[in-house]
């Protein structure tokens, strides 16, 4: 399926499941950072997405304003795609900002279409502040459906997969575009400052969107969902509201082991991945920085995997927005004028 207008980008994307390119000018970076600060004056501790905000109107407005800033650039680079909306991701500094290996949810018929994320760092990213890590070619490894209630094919080897990934350090203004089926993760931000990213989702113009849910019977239910699904689906793990069930079927689970993973990796042609990306692969350093505990994957186009994880950010929110913190924030804003 054609995603990019440029053939070189398209070929790399087809093969590796991601591609890095120059994307934003300085002015747009500044406008996006101002917008982030406006809607999220104090970041949630750890890894968070503005999509966790329970206020749907705020999310819709944020997404519209991100779209206004990116529309023209997206039209220049991509084929005719529909928008899933935009939001911001932040990692505050600390080991709890580690984001475990995951794939994003299946939302299109991947035998025919691809759904994608444009991940745009608004500050430079490196190993120190939790740059993105990807496993090249892994978008083609498994055809298993992905959703918050379905066990992932790689669940038993998430740490092993993490150590096989390459680090993708980036400059503010660059973007990495990745297929939602790609295995990706990011290490903890240990830099002392927030790492802020804008992200934007796209799906092909003709693709119907779907969401998969594991019913108590064990069967998989298939629902048709609307384009603003990610801005409105707050009750993660539940059946999506106002969505038509179009199918229900038995599903055969697939559990990958490390041998399966190593053989899939060795079958992928790593020759032509950008040299600067390959040079960053250093499993010894990655090993050192991987927190011991295995945290459930959470991100934007996979949102959060269970209800506990949506409650966590709300608790964190309450911890951050104490009267004293609000006063501090007002004072620092007045001083910085
Ligand atoms: O921002 C990150 O570190 C990871 C983002 C991610 O996993 C996603 O957008 O799916």
Image: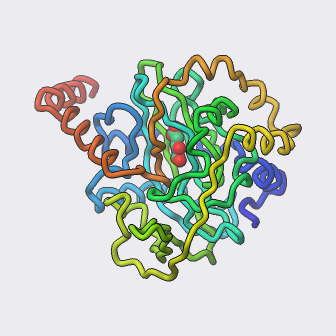
Q: Coloring scheme of the render?
A: rainbow
Q: Is 15 drawn above or below residue 197 in the view shown?
A: below
Q: Position of residue 310 (x, y in %)?
A: 31, 48
Task: Relative to 155, say whether 75 is above or below.
Answer: below
Specify whether 116 is left or right of 302.
Answer: right
Q: Position of residue 89 (x, y in %)?
A: 44, 42
Residue that lies at the very extreme toward the front in this rendered image: 217
Please tell me how many numbered marks the rendered image carries.
0
Q: Which of 53/85 is in front? A: 53
Residue at x 43% of width, y 32% of height: 91
Task: Judge left or right: residue 213 versus residue 116.
Answer: left
Q: Is residue 27 visible?
A: no
When the figure is inspected, residue 283 is found, relative to residue 65, above or below; the finding is above
Q: Is residue 237 visible to us here?
A: yes
Q: Which quarter of the rendering shows the C terminus?
A: top left
Residue 280 % position (x, y): 72, 25
Residue 67 lies, in percent from the top left, at 48, 59
Residue nearest the viewer, comparing 149 with 298: 149
Q: Residue at x 58, y 53 (%)?
A: 117
Residue at screen point 58% across, 41% down:
156
Quadrant location of residue 249?
bottom right
Q: Residue at x 76, y 61 (%)?
A: 5
Q: In the drawing, does residue 1 fall left or right of residue 47?
A: right
Place residue 201 in its image quadrant: bottom right
Say which of 272 and 184 sits in front: 184
Quarter of the image with the N terminus is bottom right
């Amino acid at each position: 399926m054609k995603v990019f207008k440029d053939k070189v980008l398209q070929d790399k994307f087809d093969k590796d499941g991601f591609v890095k390119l120059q994307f934003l000018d300085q002015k747009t970076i500044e406008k996006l950072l101002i917008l982030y600060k406006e809607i999220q004056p104090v970041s949630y501790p750890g890894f968070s997405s503005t999509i966790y905000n329970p206020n749907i109107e705020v999310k819709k407005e944020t997404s519209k304003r991100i779209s206004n800033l990116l529309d023209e650039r997206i039209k220049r680079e991509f084929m005719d795609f529909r928008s899933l909306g935009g939001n911001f991701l932040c990692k505050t500094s600390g080991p709890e900002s580690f984001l475990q290996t995951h794939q994003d949810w299946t939302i299109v018929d991947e035998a025919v279409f691809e759904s994608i994320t444009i991940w745009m760092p608004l500050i430079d990213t490196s190993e120190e502040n939790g740059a993105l890590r990807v496993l090249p070619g892994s978008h083609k490894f498994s055809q298993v459906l992905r959703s918050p209630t379905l066990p992932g094919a790689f669940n038993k080897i998430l740490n092993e997969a993490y150590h096989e990934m390459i680090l993708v350090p980036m400059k503010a203004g660059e973007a990495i575009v990745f297929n939602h089926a790609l295995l990706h993760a990011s290490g903890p931000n240990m830099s002392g400052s927030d790492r802020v990213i804008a992200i934007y989702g796209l799906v092909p113009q003709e693709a119907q969107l779907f969401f998969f849910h594991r019913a108590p019977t064990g069967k998989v239910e298939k629902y048709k969902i609307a384009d603003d699904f990610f801005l409105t689906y707050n009750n993660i793990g539940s059946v999506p509201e106002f969505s038509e069930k179009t199918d229900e079927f038995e599903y055969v689970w697939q559990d990958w082991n490390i041998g399966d993973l190593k053989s899939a990796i060795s079958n992928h042609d790593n020759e032509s991945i950008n040299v600067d990306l390959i040079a960053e692969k250093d499993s010894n350093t990655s090993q050192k920085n991987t927190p011991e505990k295995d945290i459930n994957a959470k991100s934007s186009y996979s949102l959060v995997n269970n209800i506990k994880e949506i409650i966590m950010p709300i608790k964190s929110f309450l911890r951050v927005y104490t009267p004293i913190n609000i006063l501090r924030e007002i004072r620092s804003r007045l001083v910085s004028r």
